[in-house]
Amino acid sequence: MLFWTVVFFTFYLVIFAKGNPMYNNIIKTGELTIKLYEQGKTEKEINKELFDNNWPYLFYIPLVLGTFIYYINALTVDIYKYPTIGILVYLIFTMAFSKYSNNKSKNDLTTEGGRQKYREQLYKIRKRTFKGMIKQLIFLSYYGYMFYLLVFVIR
């Protein structure tokens, strides 16, 4: 448990320092999507091409599963339980409602105007946001708290 606490603390520290790790992939995937629509490819061909370019990101699935397993195990270690329950509730709500917050307005990428609007929205995305930094600070505090519990309180 201590090992994974250090790993996750380091992971969130790197994200805090460098910004959104998916930023470059979002821009690259958006540009590829625009390019494929400009070439007149079908929806099936576009989805296949996007999957072929983004398959390495499937390795984030074990990371997500590992963090959930970590939080479930942390419930047995955490003497107050509230920080771990709070993080778990936040993650579950984030995953449940992320479907509704993404793609609020679909752009028609078959037209030049739609592609231009999509490109403008794509480049409005920032690598660092205030909300993202606050979330990373919360996660860093949580992992620091767990490190303190594991090293100094529970021996």
Image: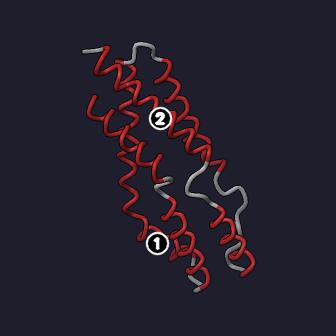
Reading the chain from its start, which is encountered first: label 1 or label 2?
1
Q: Which mark, residue 139?
A: 2
Please report contact status of discs 1 and 2: CB closer than 8 Å, yes or no. no
**Is the residue marked by circle 1 packed among few (<14), some (14-19), or many (20+) residues within 10 Å?**
few
User: Which three-letter amino acid code belongs to the residue tagged 2?
Assistant: Phe
On the image, the x and y values in percent for residue 14 come to 41, 48
Work out how far the residue at label 1 is from the one at label 2, CA to CA, in angstroms: 35 Å
Question: Outermost residue, bottom direction?
Answer: 39
State which quarter of the image contains the N terminus: top left
- Whether residue 93 sits left or right of residue 147 in the image: it is right
On the image, the x and y values in percent for residue 70 come to 36, 31
Q: Residue at x 39, y 37 (%)?
A: 67
Q: Residue at x 71, y 72 (%)?
A: 108
Q: Nearer the viewer, residue 113 or 126?
A: 126
Q: Nearer the viewer, residue 140 or 88?
A: 140
Above or below residue 39? Residue 126 is: above
Above or below residue 101? Residue 139 is: above
**Is the residue marked by circle 2 packed among few (<14), some (14-19), or many (20+) residues within 10 Å?**
some
Q: Nearer the viewer, residue 121 or 59?
A: 121
Mark 2, secondary structure of its residue: helix
In terms of image quadrants, where is residue 155? top left
- Whether residue 53 sits left or right of residue 100 in the image: it is left
User: Which three-letter amino acid code belongs to the residue tagged 1?
Assistant: Lys
Question: Outermost residue, front direction?
Answer: 17
Foreground: disc 1 or disc 2: 2
Query: Mark 1 sits on what residue?
Result: 48
On the image, the x and y values in percent for residue 118 come to 68, 70
Q: Which mark, residue 37?
A: none
Q: Residue at x 72, y 80 (%)?
A: 111
On the image, the x and y values in percent for residue 132 come to 57, 45
Number of labels in the image equals 2
